[in-house]
Amino acid sequence: MTKQLDSIFGAMADPTRRAVIERLASGPATVSDLHAPHAMALPTFMRHLAVLENAGIVRSVKRGRVRTCQIETGPLVEVQGWLAWQREIWETRSAPTPQL
């Protein structure tokens, strides 16, 4: 699980990839639509998509010449669970000790 979390966090570390995740949260989109707001060459953008796909966060399907991407929620749920676990640990550690 640690290796998978490393891959997911690594994928989410880049602002372009986070923007793609945010956009896909509202529904599937074509690569052209996802690429449009980013000032970078398409091959560079495709490398960002490949990182997201390798981490399991995004899945794409090609029909003819159109590639459509959609979010995969499983990895994000794993991250959410890990963060909740960490939050619980730190809240427990930082809880005030009762005064006697």
Image: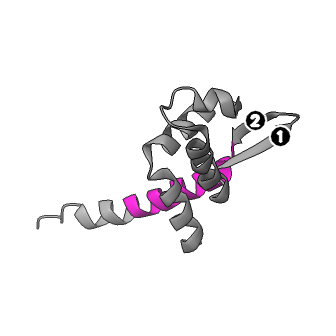
The residue located at (62%, 58%) in the rendering is 55
Q: Earlier in the sequence, mark 1 or mark 2?
A: 1
For mark 2, give the secondary structure. Answer: strand
Q: How many residues crowd around disc 1 within 10 Å: few (fewer than 14), some, or many (20 or more)? A: few
User: Does residue 65 lie above or below 7 as drawn?
Assistant: above
Q: Position of residue 99 (x, y in %)?
A: 12, 64
- Residue at label 2? 68
Answer left or right for 25 relative to 65: left
- Residue at label 1? 62
60 falls in the magenta region: no
- Note whether residue 14 is visible: yes
The residue located at (43%, 43%) in the rendering is 15
For mark 1, give the secondary structure. Answer: strand
Answer left or right for 86 relative to 24: left
Q: How much space separates mark 1 and mark 2, taking CA atoms?
A: 6 Å
- Note whether residue 25 is visible: no
The residue located at (71%, 38%) in the rendering is 69
Answer left or right for 64 relative to 25: right
Q: Which corner quadrant of the image does residue 75 belong to?
A: bottom right
Magenta region, residue range: 71-87
Task: Please identify the residue farthest to the left as the structure is shown.
Answer: 100
Q: How many residues crowd around disc 2 within 10 Å: few (fewer than 14), some, or many (20 or more)? A: some
User: Does residue 31 lie above or below 56 as drawn?
Assistant: above
Residues at discs 1 and 2 in contact (Cβ within 8 Å) = yes
Q: Amino acid at mark 1?
A: Lys
Q: Position of residue 94 (x, y in %)?
A: 23, 62
Q: Quadrant of the N terminus?
A: bottom right
Q: Position of residue 93 (x, y in %)?
A: 27, 67
Q: Position of residue 58 (x, y in %)?
A: 67, 47
80 falls in the magenta region: yes
State the count of labels.
2
Task: Please identify the residue farthest to the right as the structure is shown.
Answer: 64
